[in-house]
Amino acid sequence: MKYFILAGEARGDKQAALLCASIYKYDPQAVLKGWGGEAMIESGVDITKHYRDLAFMGFVEVIKHLPVIFKNFRLCKKEIMEFRPDALILVDYPGFNLRMASWAFKKNIPVYYYISPQLWAWHTSRVYKIKQAVRRMYVILPFEQEFYKKYNVDALYIGHPLAKGIRELKDSSIEIKKGSIALLPGSRKHEIDLILPEMVGLAKLLPDYSFRVVCVQHIPVSIYRDIIGDQSNILLVEGQMQMILQESEAAIVTSGTATLETALIGTPQVVVYKGNPLSYTIAKRLVKVPYISLVNLISEKELVPELIQKECNALTMKINLLEVLSAERNQFIRKGYEEIQQKLLSGGGSDAAAEDIVMNLSKLKG
């Protein structure tokens, strides 16, 4: 069968790659095409547009890029109609994917949604689009299945694919390096522009510590170098995020899926975020959850510190970093991480979702 997969961000690319690899297990003759990135390419997907051309985040950023976004809608619809897939698989990225779901439903293309948009956080009314257009939601956070149940939406909790993947790949021989701190400034350029300078300021305040910045593949290394300058206790590392996190005593992590990866690896962290001030002001009025990090949302308590906007500065980072390095807070965080891992390992992962999609399509085809 033929599948078109849409992943509009780095985190979606990684998750979609796991799903695609699983689809091949249950449908060895599968033909996979879509929009995504390097991880999907490595898993055997024919990628026709990279997510770096799609990842606009924040109200102001979206408005500025509306002509490009509308052009992408037209291009994507054209590609899907030419490819004539048996199924459209959408991965997170709600601003784009929910519109594509409604369009595909009208074209009688079966739609499956892998990894729920964070409707539970804000703009809950979008759940009605999902109820109409999506055959099945595959959710990866424990509380999402209950959320959809309230709206009579068919949702299958599969656990978090990262939990199983990290458990299998984690290298027990790696030792923690004393005084080593990982810095993850985000996967989008505007995040790096705003957050990495504060991380450089942190390195200046703690000259006896060694800091390593994990670069993402789709951002030119020169952008990181220009911001870091000649700060001698910061090293740039391309990729190798899991190894760097395992070696580090602690990490400063930009809010997103990376906070969960850090928790599953077991590295104490401080979560940070800084965005466009206007976008943040609007979002603050709409968001309905008490925390921004998945770590704290799953824990249902402030397991790790969160520094947002004005609090996301070098001095506050220093104070909170030293706190999470203290023995008492360190132990508290690690115990919470173990509880998160147990929650996320329940469910069948990407294999369960792939099997369900293939079986459902087979029934549809009779």
Image: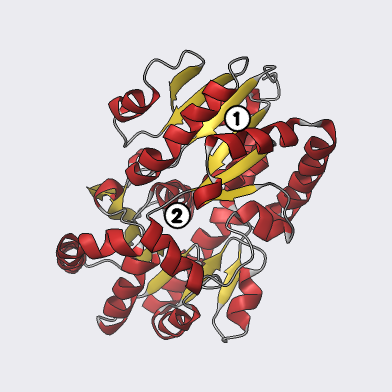
Q: Tell whether 3 sits left or right of 174.
A: left
Q: Tell whether 261 sits left or right of 89.
A: right
Residue sitting at x 34%, y 45%: 190
Q: Nearer the viewer, residue 296 or 238?
A: 296
Q: Which mark's residue is nearer the viewer, 2 or 1? A: 1
Give the residue type at disc 1. Answer: Leu
Q: Tell whether 223 sits left or right of 355.
A: left
The picture places residue 247, in percent across and down from the top left corner, at 64, 22
Q: Dot 1, how many residues are within 10 Å of its Cα: few (below 14), some (14-19), or many (20+)?
A: many
Q: Nearer the viewer, residue 10 or 307?
A: 307
The picture places residue 80, in percent across and down from the top left corner, at 21, 65
Quadrant containing the C terminus in the rendered view: bottom left
Circle 2 is placed at which residue position?
A: 23
- On the question of residue 92 being in view, the answer is no
Relative to 60, is 184 above or below? above
Q: Dot 2, how many residues are within 10 Å of its Cα: few (below 14), some (14-19), or many (20+)?
A: many
Residue sitting at x 19%, y 68%: 77
Q: Within the image, what quadrant is residue 261 found in?
A: top right
